[in-house]
Amino acid sequence: MSSGDQHDLGSALRALRIASGLTGATVARRASMSAGKLSKIENGRILPNLVDVELVLTALEVSDEAKAELLRAARAAVTESTAWRTLRRMGPWKHQQAIQAVESQTRHLRLFQGQLIPGLLQTPDYISSIFAMPPAMTPAAQEKTVAARLERQNILYQEGRSFEFLICEHVLRWLICDPYAMAVQLDRLISLSRLPSVSIGIIPLNRRMPDFPMTCFVINDDRLVVVETFHAEVSTRDTKDIAYYLSIFDNFDQVALYGAEMCELVERIRDGFLTQRESG
């Protein structure tokens, strides 16, 4: 998107806000962003990502037609990438709040993980161990980030939502925290799998893989896919991309273990961590 397009988009968002009668502070709060960031977007000083634009338009309660038109304007490049270093500069806990804002608008969430236990399913010890890894955070930043991720998990208990998680078996075996904390984490997986809104499938090591688990991704309804790479978070709203990721998810789903088989596998791995703790 050129600087001119960037300014036009910001001007359009500002015009819609003024027409709505809402203050910048009110819209920013509803969109889970600072008033300063909204002001920079409206004045064309920063380029909003697609999620930012949708959150602002949702806060303004614009019509579906207006929302679609402005999202098309923001989609000069259908796929966008935000470097992790940029997200770290804004504050990792603020990124968690931004994710929460997107999740709050999602009725059906599908998530594939070949790297870590999904954030919505993590225990406090597991979360703390993740955010203790480099690059280092201050203790205060780590505490706020852990709290923000735990706050996101409340959505699992809200009515009218559904969650499908696919996790590769090797993820359960990686020693992210000490063996006992890993055992507690795996117990939590089993417990959460019993929630009526939650489906957890484990892709076992002894089944032929239908595809390469190159990275993790989350599908929010059928409107947004967010992919995590080493250097950036990449999002796309392109319908063909979304259909492709849905097909990948379905392929892995075909070889996953559910129900009693899933619980039996997770319990075996958990018991291995408990034995490791006792022998250690």
Image: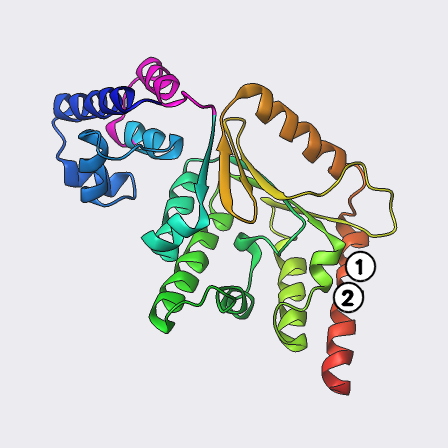
138 is within the stretch colored magenta: no
What secondary structure is marked by label 1? helix
Amino acid type at mark 1: Leu
Label 2 close to label 1 by CB (< 8 Å): yes
- The image position of residue 98, as x and y in percent, is 37, 45
Q: Quadrant of residue 80?
A: top left
75 is within the stretch colored magenta: yes
In the rendered picture of this protein, how many numbered marks are placed on residues? 2
Q: Which residue is drawn at the image coordinates 78% and 79% (left, top)?
A: 275
Mark 2 sits on what residue? 269
Q: Quadrant of residue 211?
A: top right
In the displayed structure, does residue 34 sit left or right of residue 175? Answer: left
Q: Which residue is drawn at the image coordinates 17% and 36% (left, top)?
A: 39
Q: With respect to residue 163, does 131 lie above or below?
A: below
Magenta segment:
59-78
Amino acid type at mark 2: Ile
